[in-house]
Amino acid sequence: NRDPRTAIGIKGESTVVLLTVDGRQPGYSAGLTGKELGELLLEIGVKNAAMLDGGASTEMIMEGVIINRPSFKGQERPLGGGVIVKVESSHLTLP
């Protein structure tokens, strides 16, 4: 199925990639299949990755702001856990 997806992976020797794909929103995003997610990760240079919980749980927050469009009524869904990354600004590299 095409669904919202969340993945984490390693690119090169030290670059961590966090990826969130919206889905289940006709006219905005259908999402990806697991295979399509794997192909996308390979395309951007990620060689080792894990697919995390997806669907309505897919959400990415940066500096307190939701940066994707969650499929759960367009809002946050109560969750029991997540991945939190804290980076010192001297080590942060933005695209």
Image (cartoon, rainbow, N blue to C red):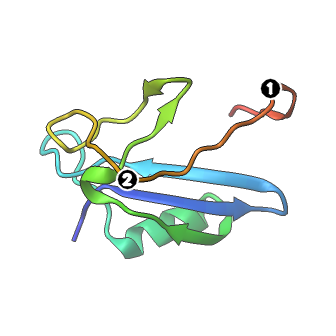
Q: Nearer the viewer, residue 41 or 61?
A: 61
Q: The residue tagged with tag 1: helix, strand or loop?
A: helix
| Residue occupying image coordinates x 56% and y 24% | 63
What amino acid type should be assigned to the residue bearing mark 2?
Gly
- Above or below residue 92? Residue 25 is below
The quadrant of the image that shows the C terminus is: top right
Q: Quadrant of residue 59?
A: top left
Q: Residues within 10 Å of mark 1 (few under 14, many from 20)?
A: few
As displayed, is residue 48 above or below residue 13?
below
Residue in the image at 59% along x and 68% along y: 42
The residue tagged 2 is 80
Residue at image position (22%, 53%) is 30
Left or right: residue 75 versus residue 54 is left
What amino acid is at disc 1?
A: Ser
Residue 73 in the image, given as x and y percentages of width and height: 14, 37
* Residue 64, disc: none
Q: Residue pushed farthest front?
A: 80
| Residue at the disc numbered 1 | 89
